[in-house]
Image (cartoon, rainbow, N blue to C red):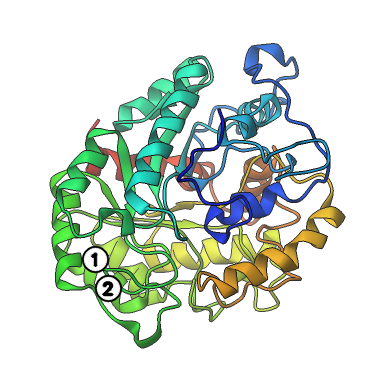
Amino acid sequence: MSRQPDDPPSDHPDLQRRRLLALAAGGAIAVPLLGRRALAAPAPADRWRGALIINALGDLENPNLTAGGSNQAVPPTEEQQIDARAIHDAHASGLSAINITLGYVAGQTDPYEYTIQQIGVWDRIVRDHPKDFLKVYRAGDILQAKREGCIGVIFGFQNAAQVGDKLDRIDTFANLGVRVIQLTYNPENQIGGGSMAPGNRGLTPFGREVVARLNQNRVMVDLSHSGQQTCLDAIRVSTQPISINHTGCRALTDLPRNKTDEELRLVAEKGGFVGIYFMPFLAASGHAHATDVVAHLEHALKVCGEDHVGIGTDGTVTQIDDLQAYASALAKEVAARKAAGIGAKGERADTYPFVVDLRGVNQFRELADRLAARGHSTGQIEKILGLNFLRYAREIWAS
């Protein structure tokens, strides 16, 4: 598939972290979309093989494919980045379902048109890999995917700017199978303030209408990236539980992308879900490790209780192979995000947007083993890995 005329340019920062990741390994050539059956090695036997693993926000692409390397005349398309290795690694990781980011996040392209086009792209990806992916409409689809050895793909947005000033677009998105809509990205929009917007503006009057319409359509209201007052306002006006699908705890690391105990507690009190990410914002140094992920999970458990906490890594399953090449591209991308006004405090040229010692196909098993070593029960760990998100999904989408 050739790049659409209204797509953003390949070097534009609104392509987000997936393009940043795609710069990591120079010169790789996209391989054909062979699918799971063409690759032999299954995941190794382990105690977590039967666990339901749901990533509340993540990526299915192979980040080792270049965005315009010497062996490619044009950057790989979305479909090319869901290559044989990406599919194999997703299965090998034990992943049961994942909320992917599609559509507009930031930039100069038309938010609505670009989002509609990207929904079509992802429908095609799922349709072309029926033995690997299953589009999720209801909570039961996640269990069906698990039974059939597929990966449930949840269509989600990381911005609601594409709603514009037309509430009926929410109906359109819901009818097209979008199941998660995050209200803001880091800047503010017509709905409310993002985590980096000045003034801590709360939910706008139109934003209240948006939340009500999302509730009517039984779409998850995600408050990741939101400013504190917008987050608190949305939790209070929503008639259904809400989620913060990828965040950290500000009590441990005081950065705007992390949530205060007040926000976390209110989400839990109203029956919602909090996913902890594998991101540099978990450590004041910017160099987050697996121990930081565990620490933030444990803090969230204390604040929210064990029925409301899970994982939303905000990263890939396929690891970056050449970190040196990645580091050389990082400074340019971070600078581009800052210039575009979409970067967050804590993003620096020397901070990877992932946890170096908790990545690749073993990341979920490694996290589970670390939690077990800390004395967490198997039942509690299984809730964190996926059962808590499933509970929340049943409440919003029904079974």
Residue projecting furthest to the bottom: 199
State the SS at label 2: helix
How many numbered markers are drawn? 2
Is the C terminus in the top left, top right, bottom left or bottom right quadrant? top left
Residue position marked by numbered label 2 in the rendering: 232
Q: Residue at x 62, y 68 (%)?
A: 336
Above/below status of 167 relative to 191: above
Q: Horizontal and vertical percent for residue 115?
A: 38, 44
Q: Residue at x 42, y 52 (%)?
A: 104
Q: Residue at x 76, y 36 (%)?
A: 72
Q: Do we see residue 370 in this rendering? A: no
Residue position marked by numbered label 1 in the rendering: 235
| Number of residues whose C-alpha sits closer than 10 Å to that of mark 1, classed few (under 14), some (14–19) or many (20 or more) | many
Q: Horizontal and vertical percent for residue 54?
A: 48, 39
Q: Do we see residue 2 in this rendering? A: yes
Instruction: Indicate the amino acid at tag 1.
Output: Ile
Instruction: Indicate the amino acid at tag 2.
Output: Leu
